[in-house]
Amino acid sequence: MRRVVAALFAVLLTAVPAAAQTPLKIMVGGIDKQIYLPAKLAAQLGFFKEEGLDVELFNSTSGSQAATALLAREVQGVVGFYDHTIDLQAKGKFITDVVQFSVAPGEVVLVKAAEADKLKQPANWKGLALGVTGLGSATDFLTRALAAKAGLKMQDYTLVPVGAGDTFLAAMQQGKISSGMTTEPTVQRALSSGTAKIGIDLRSPEETRKALGGDYPAACLYMDRGWMEANKPTVQKLVNAFVKTLKWIQAHSAEEIADKMPKDYHAGDRALYVQGLKDGKVQYSPDGLMPAGAPESVAKILASFSPNLQGKTIDLAKTYTTEFVVKANAGQ
C-alpha cells in the first residue's frame, strides 16, 4: 500500500508545472564585445533564471541596428550605449536607460602603427578615412566628438563602417582606414599583430575626461519608456540580474570572468581576451547606477557636433532612471 501511495505522490509531483518564466528578447549591439559582456555573463551565471526570466539574447553588428530593432518592437530591450537615449529623444523617440553597465565607453582609437605619433592627434585626421562599427553608432558619435574637439568639421574626414573583429582588422591592414574606433577583443588582436597602436584610450573615466572633456558612461540596458512603465515587475527582475552580474565582475579576476564566457568569444586567443579584460575592467560600473552629472556631460558632448541636438531641449530625466537599480542594490 505504501508503494502505491508513493507512486501516486510521485505522479502528482511531476504533473505540477514548473513556475512559468517570463520570456524577454534583448538585442545586443555586438554580443561578443567586452563592453557588453554583462549581458552574456548574466546568462552564463544563471542570474536570469534565478529571477524567473527566460531571456533570449540576439546579436547585431552595431548599436544603431539594435536601437532600430527596439523601435520596431522586435525586442523589449537593447544593450547599447546611453548616448542613443539622448539622440533618439531629439528625434521624438523616448527610450530609457534602466541599468548602467559601464562608467566609460570602453572604446579605443587604434591608429596605423607606422603613423601612430601623428594620428594620435585628432587634429591630424583631416582628409582621412576613419573606421567606425556603423554609421549612427556610438563609435560614430565618439569619433565625431573627438574630431570636433580638435576643431575639425564633419566634411574634413570620412567615416567608414567596418564593424569589429576580422572586418575591422582587414580594413586597417588593407589601408581602407587610417584610424578606427573599436573595443576588446579586437584591440588586443590589432596590437599583438603589430597592425596598429593605441591612439586614444577611452576605457577609464579619467582618460575619457582627458579626451572628451567630461564623463561619458556608455554601455547600458535601455527600453522603450512606455513598455518599461507598463512592465515594472519584469524590468525589476531584469535589473536585479544585471546588478548581481556587475557585483560578480567586481569580485572576480579577469581569468575567472573569461572562464565563464563562451570559448568562441575569446576569438581564438584566451590570453589576449584576458589581457583585454585586465586593461578594461575599470570601465564596469560597480552598482549599475548612473554617475552624478554624467547625463549632462554626455548631452554636452553630443551637442558639440550633432545637428540632431541643435535647437532641441532634451529632458534628461526621461533618458535614464535609477528606480530599479536602487531597489536591486538594496536587495543584494
Image (cartoon, helix red, strand yellow):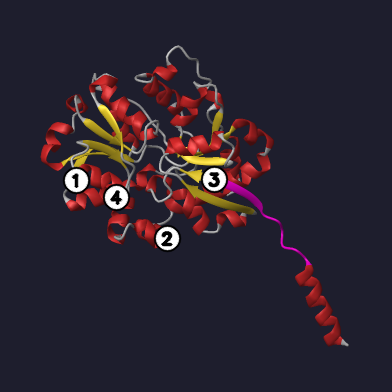
Q: How far is disc 4 from disc 2 in space, using C-alphas?
A: 18 Å
* Dot placed on the residue nearer the N-terminal end, 4 or 2: 4
The three-letter code of the residue at mark 4 reads Asp
Which residue in the protein does label 2 denote? 262
The reply to whether residue 231 is visible in this rendering is yes
- Residue depth check, mark 2 versus mark 1: number of the one nearer the observer: 1
The three-letter code of the residue at mark 2 reads Pro
* Dot placed on the residue nearer the N-terminal end, 1 or 3: 3
* Dot placed on the residue nearer the N-terminal end, 4 or 3: 3
Q: Residues within 10 Å of mark 4 (few under 14, many from 20)?
A: few
Q: Badges 4 and 3: C-beta atoms under 8 Å apart?
A: no
Task: Identify the residue at image location x=12%, y=37%.
Answer: 115
Which residue in the protein does label 1 denote? 173
Q: Which residues are magenta?
A: 16-25
The reply to whether residue 203 is visible in this rendering is no
The three-letter code of the residue at mark 3 reads Ile
Q: How far is disc 1 from disc 4 in space, using C-alphas?
A: 10 Å
Task: Identify the residue at image location x=42%, y=36%.
Answer: 218
The local secondary structure at tag 4 comes to helix
The local secondary structure at tag 2 comes to loop
Which residue in the protein does label 4 denote? 166
